[in-house]
Image (cartoon, grey):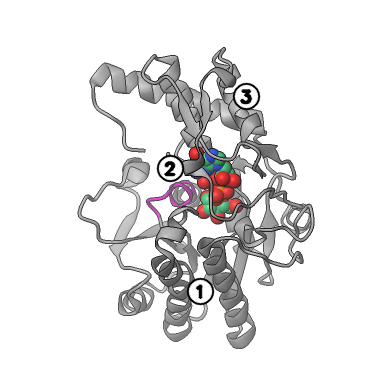
Amino acid sequence: MPLALITGISGQDGSYLAEFLLDKGYEVLGLIRHTSHGYHERIRHLLDRIQLVKADLTDFPSLLRIIEKYKPDEVYNLAGQTFVPVSWEQPILTGDVNALGVTRLLEAIRIAHPKARFYQASTSEMFGKVREIPQNENTPFYPRSPYGVSKVYAHWITVNYRESYGLFAVSGILFNHESPRRGRQFVTRKVTYAVARIKYGLQKELRLGNLDAKRDWGYTGDYVRAMWLMLQQDEPEDFVIGTGEAHSVRELCEVAFSYVGLDYRDYVVVDPKFFRPAEVDILLADPSKAKRKLGWEPTVSFEELIHMMVDADLERVRREIETGVPTRV
Ligand code: GDD
């Protein structure tokens, strides 16, 4: 059985990737940080099929020990500080985890098990103030937040370790990907959860920031398949993964509210509190290289994705009302 190590296994992407790899017959080792609360809601259903080990991307010896001990065949680095607005509040932490954390992990692999194949979770946020539309693997980066800047470093250190030491290290430049397990502070979940609460009469309005921002939103289940495919190639290469379709936050609201028979204009209030110091106006992927070389294509449309998320949130809110217990994801 091949062994995969996933950092960030308790996050949205980690939980989908763990399911995907278990189905493929992998043994899955998940790296988690020590936290005082110990909630792992997204992987609760997998806990008897995966092994969890404690380490931290800011703590090099803990990473080295794990790579030395388990010698994983594949390492997926999905851990990080992933919420863009927080990166202005905690720029140093964001850089330490998202940028230097990748160097620590690559160093551990280089020293203890250089045969491991390494996947770095890179992001369309690196394109930031976009230099061209759509964005492909050759589009120059222009990050617009401490988060984006940290990810540009992580991308290049991955490329550098591949070129300096011959590691099989790849950077997957993934555009926004969502699911019912998306954190509630991200705009898709913020909208779909609010739609469910409004439908059940628990909330009267939804306060949002920039409704004109456009994103290329896809389904996380499709995106973790792309991560795996990148590590199965003969040669390590970087890929852009997205749907090739962009929608605005306003369209997101239209689709989500109208699905339950409501008009978003009656509920959405623009609140400057949610504007960002520097915005990324539009992200749109050109995923043609992934299609050509990986045979990868998305299977869930934007409307299907938002409907899936609203359905899941309607069910969650119904359960919350029934049991009186708030859900955590
Ligand atoms: N979160 C949030 N909350 N975003 C809002 C809101 C709001 O109330 N109102 C408008 N937006 C706009 C943001 O300004 C942004 O332009 C867009 O909605 C998407 O915001 P997020 O869902 O927070 O995602 P993101 O695009 O900043 O970043 C996500 O995608 C990246 C890939 O492009 C994150 O998952 C990153 O970790 C990831 O790298």
Residue 304 on image: x %, y %: 62, 28
Give me the residue at 45% from left, 47% from top.
12
**Amino acid bearing label 1:** Ala
Residue 116 - label:
1
Question: Considering the numbered disc 1 on the image, is that residue within a helix, a strand or a loop?
Answer: loop
Q: Nearer the viewer's eye, disc 3 or disc 1?
A: 3
Residue 47 in the figure: left or right of residue 79: left
Q: Out of 48 and 178, give the one closest to the viewer.
A: 178
Residue 178 shows in the view: no
Q: Out of 197 and 166, give the one closest to the viewer.
A: 197
Question: Considering the numbered disc 2 on the image, is that residue within a helix, a strand or a loop?
Answer: loop
- Label 2 and label 3: CA atoms lie apart by 21 Å
State which region is magenta.
Answer: 9-16
**Amino acid bearing label 2:** Gly
Residue 4 on image: x %, y %: 45, 62
**Amino acid bearing label 3:** Glu
Q: Is residue 288 above or below residue 120?
A: above
Q: Earlier in the sequence, mark 2 or mark 1?
A: 1
Image quadrant in which the N terminus is located: bottom left
Residue 280 shows in the view: yes
Q: Nearer the viewer's eye, disc 2 or disc 1?
A: 2
Q: Is residue 149 above or below residue 188?
A: below
Residue that numbered label 2 is attached to: 183
Taking the view exactly as shown, the residue that stands out farthest to the front is 272
- Label 2 and label 1: CA atoms lie apart by 30 Å
Residue that numbered label 3 is attached to: 254
Q: Nearer the viewer's eye, disc 2 or disc 3?
A: 3
